[in-house]
Structure formats: structure tokens, C-alpha cells
Amino acid sequence: MLATPKRVKKFFKIIKMRRIDAIALTFGFFVGGGIIYLILRVIGIDATQAGIWTQFILVGSLILWVLSYVFRFSTGNMTYNQQVKDYKKAVLLKRLEEMTPEELEKLQAKVEADNKS
């Protein structure tokens, strides 16, 4: 299964980071590092090698996370941008709800005329 831009964009729409999520992720990241280190020690790897492999895994994970952030930034798919889009959509829907039937007919006629030209 190829990671097409559409699929990648859909995946990152699912992930919406807030400040508390970032704090929890950081805490989990360090706890995960400790767990990885302990697992490597339990399976018999000496402390130095376990530390090196733990750092390798954690730094690799951090680099992937930063790349995902850069990708979301470059595509404009960040939480703030999404909130602005949602707000604009809500404002437009509210305006449509407040329009009288005559105003809606005029708007529809104008949209149809614009689509024809």
C-alpha cells in the first residue's frame, strides 16, 4: 500500500495536537525510553549497548515526529488552520440560516449565473 499524498493527508487529519497532548506525548516518550532500556537489559544486552540502542530508537522516533510536524506545517493542516476553517464555515452556515427565502433565491440565481459564465 503506497503512501499517496491523499492518504498521508487523511492520516494527519486524524491527529490533532493540543498543548496537553504534547505534554502527555513527551512524558510517554521518556517513559517509553525507560521501558525500552529495561527490556533490552532484561534480554541480556549490557548497559552501554542498551543505552545506545535506546537513544537510537528515541532519536529516530523524534526525527519522524518532527518530519510529520514539518509536513503538516507545509500543507497548512495544523490545528489553528483547521479551527479557522471550521469557524469560517460556521459563520457562513449561520448567515445562510438567517437569510430569508427571497435572499436565498437571489443568492442561488447569482451562483447559477456565475457557474454558467
Image (cartoon, grey):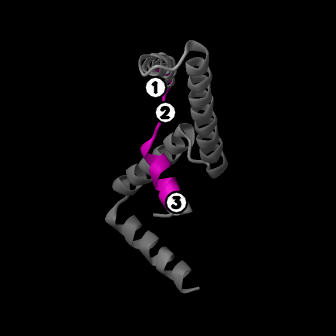
Check disc 1 and give the amino acid type. Answer: Asp
Q: Write down the residue under mark 3.
A: 3
Kindly indicate the quadrant of the structure image that contains residue 103: bottom left
Q: Residues within 10 Å of mark 3 (few under 14, many from 20)?
A: few
**Majority secondary structure in the magenta region:** helix
3 and 2 marks in contact (CB < 8 Å): no
Can you tell which of label 3 and label 2 is closer to the viewer? 3
Whole-percent x, y for residue 43 in the image: 42, 22
The tag earlier along the polypeptide, 3 or 1, is 3
The residue sitting at 58% across, 36% down in the picture is 65
Whether 49 is among the magenta residues is no
- Quarter of the picture holding the C terminus: bottom right
Query: Which structural element holds mark 3?
Result: loop
Whole-percent x, y for residue 8 in the image: 51, 55
Residue 21: assigned label: 1
- The answer, for residue 91, to whether it is visible in the render is no
Whether 15 is among the magenta residues is yes
The tag earlier along the polypeptide, 3 or 2, is 3
- Quarter of the picture holding the N terminus: bottom left
Whole-percent x, y for residue 94 in the image: 39, 49
Q: Write down the residue under mark 2.
A: 17
For the magenta stretch, what is the residue range?
7-20
Kindly give the residue lying farthest to the top in the view shown: 47
Query: Which structural element holds mark 2?
Result: loop
Please tell me whether residue 83 is drawn above or below residue 58 in the rendered image: below
2 and 1 marks in contact (CB < 8 Å): yes
